Image (cartoon, rainbow, N blue to C red):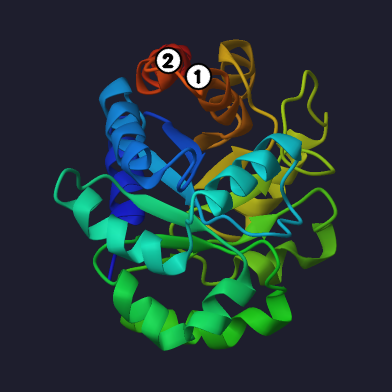
Amino acid sequence: MESRITKKFKELRLKDKKALITYITCGDPDLKTTIDLVLSMERAGAHIIELGIPYSDPLADGPVIQKASLRALRAGTNIDTFLEMIPQLRKETDIPIALLLYYNSIFRYGIKDFLDRCKGLIDGLIIPDLPLEESQGLKKLMEDYPMDLIPLVAPTSQSRIKEIVKDSHGFVYCISSFGVTGKRRDFNLDLADLIKDVRKYTDTPTAIGFGISNSNAIENLKDFADGLIVGSAIIEKIEESIGCEDTVKNVEGFVRQLKSAML
């Protein structure tokens, strides 16, 4: 069964276009605003939405997203409240949605129960702390759902790329550089080689994430991969707007700028 993510990349390839993937943390500053933000980013031209489930020890996230997770946790966001919110969001949009979350959150909830609750609502899972060797059981379970387990490939993955991307679906999340999420001015000069190596072993679309924060970065990187992921820079727009009524408006305007740079 094809996910909305797979279908979206096929649609974009036929039009010779690249995917803009935007990330926000669920519940930052609250779940109602999360719904409004998703809809505003879709209006602004985002093709795929990545939603982060807040976690107390997010090992892949830099300080900006860590603070967003803390704000969301303090607001009471968890797996249960997220799963209550997502059907409401789906009444408003059919945009592809990928979840970034940590494996313990799924494990404690109950893996099959979690997948059942997400069926038809969520299109992909990105799990930074799930090693390749331990992912096969979950991957097998997900074959019964229109949902992709999205692999992550880093600059340190060279000897393992073939196995990581084997039988992959949705897209391959290509980490732009060493370290955690956050804004960057420069990107690893070997990024093109990383994408090339991934494409040796799979036709699954590639998307670059970590550090893409403005239109200049979009313009510099858009020809490398099939999609680009922007997260921390959007979270900063949310943080700057806390306490005022401009949060959704500011994020929508920023995403419009990013989308223009994709053209």
Q: Secondary structure at mark 2?
A: helix
**Could you tell me how far apart the alpha carbons at marks 1 and 2 are, in whole angstroms?**
8 Å
Crowdedness near tag 1: few (<14), some (14–19) or many (≥20) residues, C-alpha within 10 Å: some
Tag nearer the camera, 1 or 2: 1
**Can residue 41 be seen?**
yes
Amino acid type of the residue tagged 1 in the rendering: Ser
Q: Quadrant of the N terminus?
A: bottom left
In contact (CB < 8 Å): disc 1 and disc 2? yes
Where residue 34 appears, x then y in whole percent? 37, 40
Residue at 22%, 59% in the rendered image: 87
Q: Quadrant of the C terminus?
A: top left
Task: Name the residue carrying label 1.
Answer: 241
Residue beneath the point at 80% across and 58% down = 157
Compared with 126, 207 (above or below) is: above
The answer to whether residue 3 shows anywhere in this view is no
Res. 250 image quadrant: top left
